[in-house]
Amino acid sequence: MTETRDLGGGSFVLRVAGPFEGVQAGQFCMLRTPSDWPVLLPRPFSWFDVFEPGDAALRAGEVTGAATFLGKVVGPGTSRLARLEPGEDLIVTGPLGCAWPAVDAGAREPVCIAGGVGLAPFLLWAKQRRALGARVSILYGGATRHALAASGDFAAIDPDFHFATDDGSCGFHGNVLALYRDLVARGVLDGSAPVYCCGPDPMMEAVAKDCRQRGVRCVVSLETYMACGFGVCNGCTVHVHDRGRFAGRHYVKSCTVGPVFDAEELVWPAEVSHT
């Protein structure tokens, strides 16, 4: 560990030294401490940012590279991670899972929609897209302006950020889907561009439904609870439609074929309640 940063409201950012090769935006890893770990299994985290050897942003003790992880305290495991001190060891297993779909040359740039710590898989994505000359738009929602603190890590990339807060303390007064609809209606965003989304399940379901009604592709990164990350425990199964790449199946493991899915592949709770 080289840094633990408290963002307030239970959110935090970990910074870890070590060589992290081959990480793609949207993938995840499993984190745990080698000792004094309060639970049986590690905890899943999206890669927030990755720094290769020679990167000007590397700090003392990070010669071989570094990575950051955005999380929120929800139990004893994440509480232990949030209390890590510089110099402590951390076991990082990954990269695991699949990445955000690549953008074909000449295709519309995806609109990124995030809620809470669902911002995590978008920093590395924005960094990689910016390196290719693309301009990235990110819609970020939270309960209050304090819930949006992680957006500060994007400063060097300077994406087009649009904020939404439930209490109106920062940006648009309302939820992030209402913000998206407003920006499309005003012509600020291309309403036909694909949407990449990560956040609480109800938010992603609402965004996916909106995109479906308008014929827009929506890709989501699920925040499914994972116990192992390798497809062994079956703890991260998700309900999918029996078609396409999942023909003949009704459930798949998010850790091995996800966490990134086309929203139309998933059976959302509202669909189940109406069958």
Image (cartoon, grey):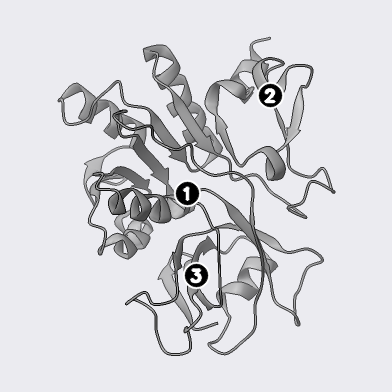
Tell me the kind of residue under disc 2. Answer: Val
Q: Which residue is mark 2?
A: 240
Distance from Cα at disc 1 to Cα at disc 2: 21 Å
Quadrant position of residue 190: top left
**Category of crowding for the residue at label 3, using alpha-carbon neighbours closer than 10 angstroms: few (below 14), some (14–19), many (at least 20):** many
Q: Which residue is mark 1?
A: 118
Give residue 259's position: percent from left, percent from top: 61, 42
Tell me the kind of residue under disc 3. Answer: Ala
Quadrant where the C terminus is found in the figure: top right
Give residue 241's position: percent from left, percent from top: 68, 18
Q: How many numbered marks are there?
A: 3
| Dot in front, 1 or 2 | 2
**Category of crowding for the residue at label 1, using alpha-carbon neighbours closer than 10 angstroms: few (below 14), some (14–19), many (at least 20):** many
Q: Is residue 241 above or below residue 166?
A: above
Tell me the kind of residue under disc 1. Answer: Gly
Between discs 3 and 2, the one toward the N terminus:
3
Q: Residue drawn at (78%, 68%), measured in percent from left and top?
A: 39
Quadrant position of residue 74: bottom right
Between discs 3 and 1, the one toward the N terminus:
3
Q: Residue drawn at (64%, 47%), measured in percent from left and top?
A: 97
**Viewer-nearest residue: 234 or 59:** 59
Q: Residue drawn at (53%, 87%), measured in percent from left and top?
A: 86
**Category of crowding for the residue at label 2, using alpha-carbon neighbours closer than 10 angstroms: few (below 14), some (14–19), many (at least 20):** some
